[in-house]
Amino acid sequence: MMPWFWVAIKSDPHNVEAWSTAWYTASHMMKDDALALRIAVEGQRLNPESLEMACVLGRAYRAGATRDQEKSEEMFHKVLELARMKRELEDGDELPLCSALGYLADSAKNRNDTQELAVLLNAARRFAPHHPITSSIERMLAK
């Protein structure tokens, strides 16, 4: 499968779906976290304004063999930053945005960081008021 992804990526380096699928294949099907991280880094470098690629890189840094919590959270915060910079979210932006909010909220909850949870709740209410992640963060704060 990977040769097909390389062809798709080389023919259109801004094909975020190809980068994301290549990362998923390397990470989850091939179980090669190092290759998955290289794919995610390059995909994000070539698509720096993509919420999806920032989220993919955050997930790649979160993987077992490449675990780097600090870089992972940095990329998930980048997703939020990119969303704030857009006048309007595009089709497909909700999933990476809500995923980033979920990962960040989980990390903040594990650190008992209620201040960070409150910031994330504000972002969730702004960008995804009716998404389950918003009520999930509300419940985290209520505990």
Image (tube, rainbow, N blue to C red):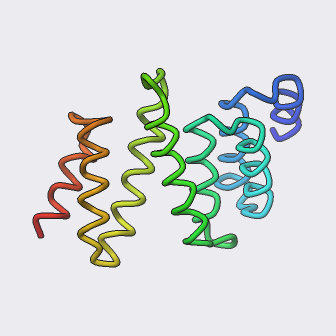
Closer to us: 136 or 30: 136
In the image, farthest residue toward the left: 142
In the image, farthest residue toward the bottom: 111
In this image, 57 relative to 129: left or right? Answer: right
Residue at image point 45% right, 45% down: 80
In which quadrant of the rendered image does the C terminus lie? bottom left
Q: Position of residue 68 (x, y in %)?
A: 62, 72
Quarter of image, res 109: bottom left
Task: Classify 129 as above or below 111.
Answer: above
Closer to us: 87 or 99: 87
Task: Classify 123 as above or below 70.
Answer: above
Residue at image point 68% right, 31% down: 16
In which quadrant of the rendered image does the N terminus lie? top right
Image label count: 0
Q: Position of residue 19 (x, y in %)?
A: 72, 37
Task: Classify 129 as above or below 115.
Answer: above
Closer to us: 46 or 130: 46
Quarter of image, res 111: bottom left
Q: Position of residue 21 (x, y in %)?
A: 67, 38
In this image, 75 relative to 86: left or right? Answer: right
Residue at image point 60% right, 48% down: 56
Quarter of image, res 88: top left
